[in-house]
Structures are given as structure tokens and as C-alpha cells.
Image (cartoon, coloured by chain):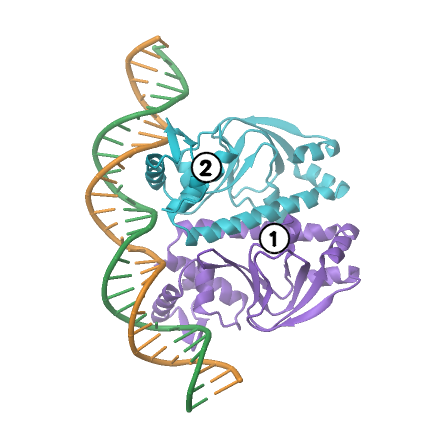
Chain colours: A cyan, B purple, C green, D orange
Amino acid sequence: MFFKFVKPFLQNYQEIECKKGEVIYYQGDTPQNIYFVHEGIVGLFHITESGKETFLRIFTSGSVMGHRSYLAKEQYHASSVALEKTSLIVISRDECERICLEEPQLIMNLAQIMAKDLGSIELRMSGLSDKSVTKRIVDSLLFLKLRHPHHIWTRKEIAEYSGSTFETVTRVMTQLTELGLIEKQGRDFKIIDNKKLISYKD
Amino acid sequence: MFFKFVKPFLQNYQEIECKKGEVIYYQGDTPQNIYFVHEGIVGLFHITESGKETFLRIFTSGSVMGHRSYLAKEQYHASSVALEKTSLIVISRDECERICLEEPQLIMNLAQIMAKDLGSIELRMSGLSDKSVTKRIVDSLLFLKLRHPHHIWTRKEIAEYSGSTFETVTRVMTQLTELGLIEKQGRDFKIIDNKKLISYKD
DNA sequence: CGTTAGTTTGAGGCAGATCAACTTTGGTGG
DNA sequence: CCACCAAAGTTGATCTGCCTCAAACTAACG
């Protein structure tokens, strides 16, 4: 857990609570803070000129967020939205700068996080032009549900994560239910046959 | 230029020459070195199980490469291929580790590079499900050609950068030629009307 | 000047988006 | 606690952008 490591160096920070749907920062804004997710789930979404949203990253208990824009010295390229009730630790830019100088290991950790994120987004991007929607949706169901078994992922969120539409997500999920690989439970769903699901090809 | 900054700290390194088409490291390999591009152009390509290639990043005079896998402590997730005659500076992992400890600013620089790369790949990914192929190919033509005006980009490379196929690239380029926005010159092409090309919608 | 890698063009098909109408779910406030 | 309603999900019909396959052409290099 990243925050545990940072905490000893902090002189001041504040803790805030966000309710479901609340926006933590907006695409286009200038970064003022770095955030740690203490409890909850936050999604990073990019929205294009035409209004299409893409679900880029998940921040979860223990994650840092806002660091990319801070380190790149850029505006936020996407918005952070709480997907459920979330508590955050907020650290100002100045405070962050101070700690980075004091403790270089911090940058090392951030670098490793970004290196992994860069790798996984590049693989997702490659999958986007290679795999069928069905395969991508299956991958997303597995990823999202295994990571947060108790969160109810909406069809829209799954669609935006897999690069698809919510109608197609519905269709694929119906198909998977008929095959007994998942089970719908109201708006939620449960993975029944993990193994078959992983190796599922349409 | 990144290398100029690092050079004073180096105790030993070697310089190698790659000819066009030569693979510097393979997807799946375990990282042994960090590389600086001294002169030339290198492409980073990911290849899927089914054989589809994606052109992920360009490394050019002054770029570092191999740092992502090194920092993430992962295998290479993609292959580096020289796109023309290229000279590289090779630095071993050990040497790299030594310098990083000695000079924390190095990690800071790498972090900034990755932060920018992460941002731009996330925007490209978002464009992949939002924009038409035509738009994506136009974007890629602009990006690749403005960055390396003297390099002859193949239709295949443009396709793999834009997430398309070389036949579609050909068709779009023919269309753009007819409109007088670009001009084909053998296998090469020239941008005629930069401004119109930027704002071009099919 | 032959060979190979790269390019062009055409025809055809289909995966998945879009549009539309209807149903279900689950939270909330009376 | 129940009734209501907005938000979320389902399902069907249609349409088209782009990929795929195929075949012929051309540039460039040894």
C-alpha cells in the first residue's frame, strides 16, 4: 500500500469523502493535487469531442491518482469519477514536491506504477484492433469482476472499458448466461465458470 | 537530449549499429539493457497471438528505450525494430541501477517521459473507438510525417500505427491525393495542405 | 534486368454500431 | 411498507464502415 509508505513523510494533508458519481477532477483542469484512494473505487474516463467516453483506468483502495498529469506537467487528459462512496487523501502539489525531494524512492514507486499502466494500456490498445468485441467484453468482465467482486458494474461501464456499446455488452452477457459461464443477479452478475470464461472464444 | 544528461555519470557503455529491419529486442525477452537512440528511428511493435501487429511507440534520436520493462520489472511486452540504419548506446541493467542511485534526477526524467507516453497512448486508444479510420489515418500521416519528414513510411507501418489495414491506408491516401491535401511521390508522400489535412473529416 | 517487397484497386461480406420500443430494477419519499 | 418513477437493462431490426480476399501492377535494389 503506497500511502502507508508516504504517510511518515507528510506534514499536512486532508481527507475528503466523495459520494457515488462525484467528479474528483475534470479533464482539462490544471492539476493542483495528488490523491490517494483510501477506500472505494474511482474510474478515470476520457470523453471525446463527440461525447464518446472511454474507461481508461481504475483506482482502488491504495492507488495514487493525479500523478500522471503532475509528472508530465500537463493538464488532466481525463476525468476522475467516484464509482462508489470513496474516501480520499489529498496532498497538494507543493507538499508532493517537498516529499519527492526528501524521499526519491517515491518517484521510483510512481515510475513503476506508470510503467505497469503503460504496458497494460498498450496491450489493451493492441487487443482493441485484434480481438472480437465478444472476447474484449469477456476479458473486461473477468478483469472488473475479479478485481471488485462486490461492485455492481453497469453495462455502460463494462462497454466503456471494453471499447464497445452497452447493447452489445447485454447481448454478450445473455449469451454467456445461456452457456452457464456467468449468472445474472438483478443488475449484478456472478462468474460461474472462471476457467471456461477465460478461454472463451465466440 | 536525454543521453547528454546521462553521459557524465556513465562508467561504461557500448555503442552498436543496427541496420534497417534489425530487431533490437524481442517481445517476451527479459530486459538486460537500457538503450539510447543516438541516430536513427526505432519502432516498438506488439504482435498478438493471431499475428496482428500494432505500432505502439516511436523512438528517435535522443529517446530512451527498454526503460518501461526495466522499471515495471516485467518482460518486454513488445519488440523494438530499427526502421532505418540506427546507432544505439547500450547500458547494462547494473550500470543503470548504479546511475539511478547516484543521480535521482534520472528517474524523474524517465517518469516524465512515461507520464507523457501514458497520456498519449490513452488518447490514441480513446480515438480508436471514437474516430473513423479515415480520421485516424489522417492523424497518423500528420504525426509520422511531421516527425520524420525524410523517412519513407510504408502503408503497413501507417496502418499499424492507426489501427487499420494497409489497403485502407492506400485508399485514404488516394482520396487525399485527389483532394490535393497530400501528394504521392513513388512510395513516399508529401503533405501539401497541412491546415486542411488537420481539420479533415471524411 | 530480374526479383521481391510494397502498392493499388475491385468485389463482397459481416461484425458490430445505431436506432427504437419495451421491460425490469431498485431506490425514495409519502 | 408500498407505490412510483427514473435509471438501467433487454431485445429486435436495420444498416454500413471497414476488413478480407484476390489479382494485377510498380518501385527500388543488388
Q: Is residue A76 above or below residue D29?
A: above
Q: Is residue A131 above or below residue B43?
A: above
Label 1 CA crowd tier, 10 Å (few <14, some 14–19, many 20+): some
Residue B152, how many percent across, how many down? 49, 72
For label 2, the residue is: A194
Q: Is residue B198 visible?
A: no
Q: Please, what secondary structure does the residue beneath circle 2 have?
A: helix
Label 2 CA crowd tier, 10 Å (few <14, some 14–19, many 20+): some
> Quadrant of the rendered structure where residue B175 is?
bottom left
Q: Residue at x 54, y 41 (%)?
A: A29
Q: Amino acid at mark 2?
A: Asn
Q: Please, what secondary structure does the residue beneath circle 1 have?
A: loop
Q: Nearer the viewer, residue C13 or B158?
A: C13
Residue B5, how many percent across, how many down? 73, 60
Looking at the rendering, in which quadrant would you find the N terminus of chain A? top right
Q: Is residue B138 above or below residue B188?
A: above
Residue C25, how many percent across, how many down? 35, 24
Q: Is residue D22 above or below residue A36?
A: below
Query: Which numbered dot is residue A6?
Result: none
Q: Residue at x 39, y 47 (%)?
A: A201
Total label count? Answer: 2
For label 1, the residue is: B75
